[in-house]
Amino acid sequence: MKLISVVRVCASLLALIGGPASAKVFSPTTFKLANGLEVVVIEDHLAPVVTQMVWYRTGAADEDAGHSGIAHFLEHLMFKGTPTVGPGEFSKIVARNGGEDNAFTFYDYTAYFQTIAADRLDLIMKLEADRMQNLSLSDDQVYPERDVIVEERRQRIDSSPEARLVEAMRYSLLTNSPYGRPAIGWEQEMEALTTADAVAWYKKWYTPSNATLIVVGDVKPDDVKALADKYYGPIPARPVPERLRPQIAPLTGAERRITLRDANIHQPAFVRMYVAPNYSAKTRNQALALEVFDEIFGTGTTSRLYQTLAVKMKVATGASSSYDDTALDPIAYDISANPAPGKDIAEVEKAVDLVIQTLLKGGVTDSEVSDAKTRLQAQAILARDSLDGPAHSIGEALSTGQTIDDVENWPDNIGAVTTDEVNAAMRAVLGPDGASVTGWLLPSQGTKAPMDAVAAANSAPVASGPIR
Amino acid sequence: MKLISVVRVCASLLALIGGPASAKVFSPTTFKLANGLEVVVIEDHLAPVVTQMVWYRTGAADEDAGHSGIAHFLEHLMFKGTPTVGPGEFSKIVARNGGEDNAFTFYDYTAYFQTIAADRLDLIMKLEADRMQNLSLSDDQVYPERDVIVEERRQRIDSSPEARLVEAMRYSLLTNSPYGRPAIGWEQEMEALTTADAVAWYKKWYTPSNATLIVVGDVKPDDVKALADKYYGPIPARPVPERLRPQIAPLTGAERRITLRDANIHQPAFVRMYVAPNYSAKTRNQALALEVFDEIFGTGTTSRLYQTLAVKMKVATGASSSYDDTALDPIAYDISANPAPGKDIAEVEKAVDLVIQTLLKGGVTDSEVSDAKTRLQAQAILARDSLDGPAHSIGEALSTGQTIDDVENWPDNIGAVTTDEVNAAMRAVLGPDGASVTGWLLPSQGTKAPMDAVAAANSAPVASGPIR
């Protein structure tokens, strides 16, 4: 919906939680309705408010080739009404009752949420259950909204040099994977989406057995169950197709570089992306070890990257890494840094490679691993202190092949990671057998970046996050 | 089938024909059977031989995402027999009768051909019509052949640094287009192809209404018609799906580079690819103009590229361009050059860019255009002098959306191209609004290329051609 940067929301959330969070933190109550709807309730009685989130296990990576953008388009269209709730009425009703609502789409999921006074849970469950089964789409609602998503793409990607660089890098890195496509879609394909496409997508994926309902706040599980039975229970189940996707074909052994110059760039940026394992049963140990590595390597001002580039060598104003492994398929591990005033981007790249080569040669130390694990586990505790944080962590995990147990056991699993595992996982991703793409974001040749103005700025965020 | 390099066959063929050839050259007789099979006969009575080609209008670009390789796999499996012709017997029968046969697959088509004594046309038509409708596939034939195509990929691509560079460049350049995938497939997907996939592909695309039969040689059209009626006529027609493909989303405004270093590289190569229009109704004029441009820019030793790099500056031993526009969708325009002994690849790139900048600024001249058109038209006349040349030109044209008239009128259309059109087409592709990828193929760092050994070598061919 709105152009809120969920990139940042998620980045801070992930920084907090550092990956799948622990149920020893959230202590959820879970149950399943007869139609397959999975329900998760987390009690939080600090304030008389409640957040409802419904997560559908479908997203941009499930789109057929040639139909990119349909997942996000349908997310927009879910606000276009049902026979009993007029177009745009959903959000107005929530707002009139003092609440707020929104939605977001990413590669593996599409989610809808409202936060409202706890005694209005009945209302928002009724509304959300209604549009789970009764969405009503007509051309006069659909086509103007298509203009909106196309314009959204222009604003978010086409008019942002950084986003265009990231789009090109991800496409090149995540070869053959739908994660290499922009989650919002390719413009020409978005422009060709039809009402029939939207209806087909809705019928294919939007059914209780393909959804998770998460309720967090000042509620009791029994009351939530009664309301869920009342509103979601009568929705008939439909079979859901398997999520079959083309798998990544990583192009190793080649050095790939993309340089984007634009007159609007005032802060040059260095970006490197590597193919990395996602958090799945098959590669869970590597993913856990990389989470620990990422903490050591590029999280915060004590990290190897920041200490070397910004503190010791002073070639960069900021340097960090980002690893969001909560996904169904292999993903990108991102590194970014911004040159310090007067420093060349090539110097920054050299410094990043120096840090990496030092790590590949010497590995991380036992004490770094121990400290990182402690920080990650502590952050899991902190993650309790919001309504949407827990809902987001659990929803994301359950939408990407994890179980509540996976979430519950995360702190213990992090605790079990060894230094050898961290070094092996790091070497597999950053070492000579890995696949990477290097990006430079630079002012147009001839223009000179006003370096002083950005001297104090932090490194630009790299990750492409969910879109609203 | 065999690992014959059709790249070279096609490159020389295209060099000869320079694009769609002229019917004023081939003078074909055409007719259509009731089941939709299109038949083209070209008489050539120089020798008592005949070539039969059957072109199916399907290829690697029609594959569903996740199923790459199936078009080429089925091509191999077409030799696995029918109820009346045992596995491998097809080629043995042709050989016993003094003929030879083969097949090839590319993005837009799959073709089968035999050349044999003219009095054996009856035999090869009977055989080819048989496998058009009666292909019989069993697991014990299919799975060993899958190992063959996987091994073929390893030999053709994975063990060739140049092929790996080209694969990575095409993927990056032809963003979102199936032409960006390797026509042979991604290894992991080839390894997962099943008998059921092959049967489904055969049933989907192999039907008379989706094929062109081309017979060239010492034959009379009436005799060919009688035989075609006898053997192909009884095959029932089946509906053929539309060829819907994701369209290219060119990433402009970014400089993309791929460098591949390998210990086995003894001859460094510079490769540049640009997104270019295909020869279709929509972009025919641009394609025709680019064909003329390509002749001026990078075809032969009188070309701008060769003259500047190899003759005047002496930075390269060879330099050429390649533009094969006979395709259903936008394609890559390729430039390649090999550094001369002692010259750095960066110097070669600089020289290529100098030639391009000079052209963008000053354009081509009227006399260059006039000479190029004359050469192209003369080459069309030469194209008559073989059996498979005409068959290939017509088959390729008819499989990529062209008509016989398009082929017939090609020399006239080339003749009508103006200098302004050449310059406009060139600027659209090579100018600042174009999309390109630059590739460097280099020896591993530390190894030194034995420059003397390659001093006399020509530039490496770049284009990825059909696979057998």
Image (tube, coloured by chain):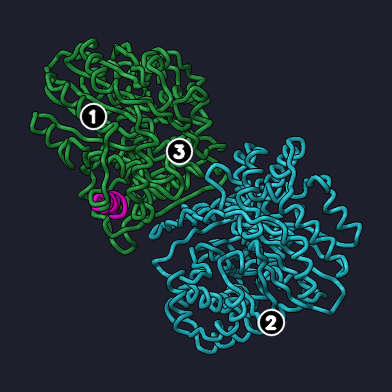
Chain colours: A green, B cyan
Q: Position of residue B35 (x, y in %)?
A: 65, 61
Q: What residue is rendered at 51% in x and 62% in y? A: B329
Q: Position of residue A23 (x, y in %)?
A: 33, 13
Magenta residue check for A149: yes
Eye-nearest disc, 1 or 3: 1
Q: Which mark is residue A128?
A: 1
| Mark 1 element type | helix
Q: Quadrant of the C terminus of chain B?
A: bottom right
Q: What residue is rendered at 44% in x and 62% in y? A: B435
Viewer-side residue, A129 vs A215: A129
Magenta residue check for A372: no
Report the amino acid beneath label 3. Answer: Leu
User: Mark 3 Cα within 10 Å, few/some/many (few <14, many 20+)?
Assistant: some
Q: Is B129 situated left or right of A194 in this image?
A: right
Q: Position of residue B207 (x, y in %)?
A: 65, 55
Report the amino acid beneath label 1. Answer: Glu
Q: Vertical placement of B93 versus A34: above or below?
A: below
Q: Which mark is residue A235?
A: none
Judging by the rendered image, the residue that carries numbered circle 2 is B25
As measured in the structure, the alpha-carbon distance from the residue carrying label 3 to the one carrying label 2 is: 63 Å
Judging by the rendered image, the residue that carries numbered circle 3 is A354
As measured in the structure, the alpha-carbon distance from the residue carrying label 1 to the one carrying label 3 is: 52 Å
Chain under label 3?
Answer: A
Q: Where does the magenta region start and end?
A: A144-159
Q: Are marks 1 and 2 on the same chain?
A: no
Q: Can the viewer see residue B460 in this picture? A: no
Q: Are marks 3 and 2 on the same chain?
A: no
Q: Are marks 1 and 3 in contact (CB under 8 Å)?
A: no
Q: What residue is rendered at 30% in x and 12% in y? A: A29
Chain under label 2?
Answer: B
